[in-house]
Image (cartoon, grey):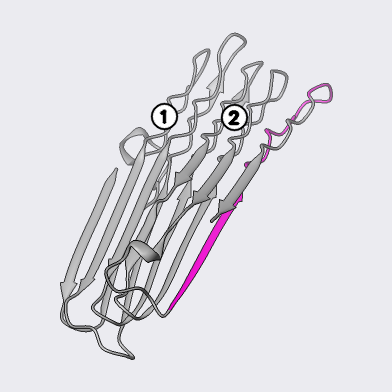
Amino acid sequence: STASTTITGSRSVNASATVVPRDPDRDNGVGGSASINASGWAGGAATASAAGISTAGQSGDQVTVTASATGGDGGSGDGAGHAGGKGGTARATASADSAGALVDATVTQTGGSGGDGSDGANGGAGAASTLTNAVSGVSNGGNLTLSQTAVGGNGGGSDTGVVGAAGSATSSLSFDDTKSTTQSQSVTGETYATGGYGGTGEGGTTAGGAGASATAVSS
C-alpha cells in the first residue's frame, strides 16, 4: 500500500500521509492465514510520503507535515514444518519547506508483526524498521523541528514450535542547517527507536522470544 501527499500554499500548510493495514485478509495488507498444514502469507509492504510547502509563510504561520507507515502483519501458519508469515516492511518520509514560518516534519515507521504458528508451526519474524534522515525541512529564518520514530514488528507466537524473532529498530538523524541559504532561528531534532517484542510461547515447553535491539542517534 502506498500513500503520497504534496501540499503547496501561501501561508500555513498541513500535509499528512498514513498507511496502515486493515482487516486480516490478503487484500488489505495483512497476510492470509493457513487453514491447515501450510505457512501464512507475508504481510504487505507500506510506503507513505508527505511534503508541505509554504511560499509566503510569515511569523505565526505553521507548516506541519506528518508521514506514518505500518507494515501488514503476517498471516498465521499451521502444522510442523510451516510458519506464520513474516511482517511487512514499512517506509516513510516527510519534508517541510517554508518562507519563514514554524516548520515541523514528523515520521513514524512501524514494521509489521509476524504471524502466529499453531499445531507445531513456527512463529513468523517481525519486520525490522530503519530510518536514516527520513525527515527534512527548511524554515528560512523560522523555527524548525524534525522528528522521526522507528518501531520494529513483534515476533509471532507459537504453541509448540519456535517463536518468531522480533524486528529491530534503528533511527538515525543528521541535519546541518548551516547549509541552508537562510538559517533557521532554532533547530530541534528528535529521534526515537523501539524494538519489537519477541514471540509468545503458548505451550508449556515453548519459551518466549527475546525482544529486539533498538538504536537512536541524532546529530
In the rendered view, does 156 fall on the left or right side of 205? left
Residue shown at 49% from the left, 27% from the top: 86
Residue 108, compared with residue 73, is above or below; it is below
Taking the image as drawn, is residue 16 in sight? Answer: no
Taking the image as drawn, is residue 161 in sight? Answer: yes
Q: Quadrant of residue 102?
A: bottom left
The residue tagged 1 is: 32
Q: Position of residue 204 (x, y in %)?
A: 84, 25
Residue sitting at the far top: 81
Residue 167, compared with residue 102, is above or below; it is above
Residue shown at 51% from the left, 48% from the top: 172
Q: Position of residue 80 (x, y in %)?
A: 62, 10
Whether 96 is among the magenta residues is no
Badge 1 amino acid: Gly
Residue shown at 41% from the left, 37% from the top: 30
Q: Position of residue 48 (x, y in %)?
A: 32, 51
Q: Quadrant of the N terminus?
A: top left
Along the line of sight, which residue is nearer the eye, 132 or 114?
Answer: 132
Which class describes the residues within 10 Å of circle 1: few (<14), some (14-19), or many (20+)?
many
Q: Which residues are magenta?
A: 186-206
In the rendered view, does 70 fall on the left or right side of 59? right
Q: Tag 2's secondary structure?
A: loop
Residue 100, compared with residue 136, is above or below; it is below
Badge 2 amino acid: Asp
> How far apart are the alpha carbons under marks 1 and 2?
12 Å
The residue tagged 2 is: 116
